[in-house]
Image (spheres, rainbow, N blue to C red):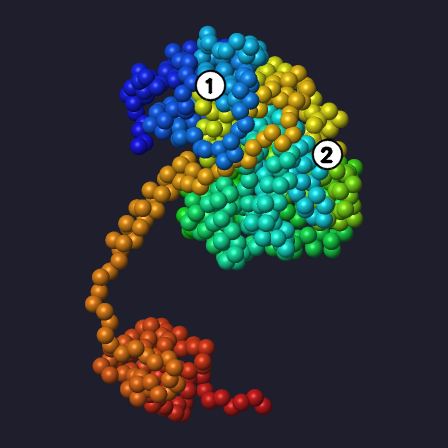
Amino acid sequence: MMSSSISDTEDQATSSNAFFHYIPTKIDTDPLAYHSNPESSFYVIKNAQQSSSSFPSANSNTLRAGNARTLFTVIPPMPQDTVARPHTSQQRLLIKGGRVVNDDGTTLADVFIEDGVIKQIGLNLVVPAGTKTVDASDKLVMPGGIDTHTHFELPFMGTRSVDDFLTGTQAAIAGGTTTILDFVIPSKEQSLAEAYTQWRERADAKVCCDYGLHAAITTWNDQVAKDMETLTKEKGINSFKVFMAYKGVFMLQDDEIFQVFAKCRELGAIAMVHAENGSVITELEKEMSVLGITGPEGHLLSRPEKLEAEATNRAITIAEETRCPLYVVHVMSKTAADKVTQARLKGQVVFGEPIAASLGADGSQYFNKCWRHAAAHVMSPPLRDDAETGPYLMDLLANGTLSATGTDHCTFNANQKALGKDDFRKIPNGVNGVEDRLAVIWTKGVETGKLDVNQFVAVTSSNAARIFNIYPKKGRIAVGSDGDCIIWDPKASKTISAATHHQACDFNIFEGLQCQGLPIVTIVAGKIAWENGQLNAVQGSGKYLNTACYAEYVYQKLNKREELRDQKMKEQKIEREPYTGEVIDLSKPQAETKSKDQPIQSSGEPNAASVGFHNRPATRAGGRNQQDSSFTFSGDQWDDRNQRKTTRVQQPPGGQSKGLK
Ligand SMILES: NC(=O)NCCC(=O)O
Ligand SMILES: [Zn+2]
């Protein structure tokens, strides 16, 4: 039962199994909790109780998540782990003295984690002797980041992305991300099911943090549809991406996209789209060749922004027609973002994902004199040559129009990018970001006053958890949630560089960016995996996340709409007596049908339509209505069978034709 009243919350606060009592108040004067939005309030957890019981039930209310800032919502029940976490019973950690930041509120509280799960939140907690303590005084304690979009060790464009599930998740952890969602992308000769197994094999042995999978649909047939069912029902995948780009490789046609989206809707999954007009891009690429443009700038010039916006709109339209929720990956331009905005304003369930690159870098790099530098930025859709795009996308994140952030982390070294040294079309597409996303968003979002700390948590973690149905296991600091947290120091700073990053690639698109605000500690499943610049991540310790279909955050509205739509459709059904007259026998030659023998005109009533063309009634004299076209593909006139009256005109107006002499 959904409930959303303040009194419910008050009831809950006094009930025996209440954990927190949230009091909306504007008491916070601490600069750490600075709020840029004057309308938003701070929420303080009072009377936090120690508890070792399980997560609040689905009936319990808490403050509304996300940057929409509706006040009360329901926390769904905790999703079940598919793989039991091994119990290392002595694994206990107390995070002391920090300010706990969720997407809906901030409070001063300690956090006690045991066996990978948050067990207590509050002040003066009683914890077992020997518990390891980490000091978070003057720092923020936030849910670990969720990167919605990575491509670790992806075979692509003749090579393979260099960050694998080990270096990729290590780098993620160094940057404060504790969950990644990667994409299963089948090769031409592979089934979706085989590709899924392959991805699991690659990832399970290496991941240092939990991970989930989306799957890409790169071809469409009945078997793929069946595999989608298996992946959703048995393998924990709830999101499927189609490509409108990479013609001849991954790209699907509109009718296929329609069918994929319809299938997603049927399964309760989320459709995802890489939105670019691949067919037009292929033509524009050829034009670049004709113009002699072979360098990385050709990549940008052949992928104009309007082709991203057009495809975004097309995908949104198809999603609307299939009544399917849509997640637009890597929103790279203002106009594409506007399409998402327009759809959301109309109430469509569409989510937009800007990435670290579109928020923190720009496409002027494609014109850099150094080929290696320019090629290192090649990704699709491209970075836009416009310094305003990043701030624009950040504004849309701040006002809730864009929802979650990823990175599309897909890295290639210079020698791999060099596959396209003479032809930009062969430069492997992809850039870095998994390590830098949080610092870039803090620097470009919080430090500019666009995002408050709670919105920062929303767009880096909680919103993604809700959309992909892993909330509140992930994306929240709460009793019962996984012990994936970061201790964030808003005062810490660094300059991003490939020389010091943990990503395997030899280039960093944020090179030289001075970041303000960093994760000084990253806790993965209750263990410190990153502290004071030291990685202590454990290879293979991450678990695969089962993501269930019908995420309430996504589908609740849609299910209701579907119900109402069905009802409305049924209301429009007309009950009629069945037609009992003659039905034309199409197997017989048309000449034998009755209509041939019957006069076309009987009572001056219209019957022209009955012979296959013309809609307007004949004239009283039985002639063709002059407003009807006399054209048919057969060349026939509808009144061919009527005898025509002819009158020889002896003296036509304008004189007799004598013919040419
Ligand atoms: N985005 C990109 O350029 N590379 C990764 C593959 C994809 O997502 O398109
Ligand atoms: Zn991608």
**What kind of residue is marked 1?**
Lys
Quick check: can you spot residue 93?
yes
| Quadrant showing the N terminus | top left
Q: Quadrant of the C terminus?
A: bottom right
- Badge 1 crowding class, 10 Å Cα cut-off, few under 14, some 14 to 19, many 20 or more, is many
Vertical placement of 293 versus 625: above or below? above
Question: Considering only vertical position in the picture, is 56 above or below 308?
Answer: above
Residue lying furthest left:
577
Residue shown at 49%/54% (left/top)?
A: 225
| SS under mark 1 | strand
Residue at 57%, 50% in the rendered image: 192
Q: Of 427 and 100, which appears nearest the observer?
A: 100
Q: Which mark is residue 505?
A: 2
Question: In 3D space, how far apart are the residues under numbered discs 1 and 2 (Cα atoms)?
Answer: 38 Å
Name the mark nearer the viewer: 1 or 2.
Answer: 1
Residue displayed at 68% across by 19% down: 534
Residue 339: % across, % down = 49, 42
Q: Could you say whether the residue bearing mark 2 is in a helix, strand or loop?
A: loop
**Image quadrant assignment for residue 92:** top right
**Residue, disc 1:** 119
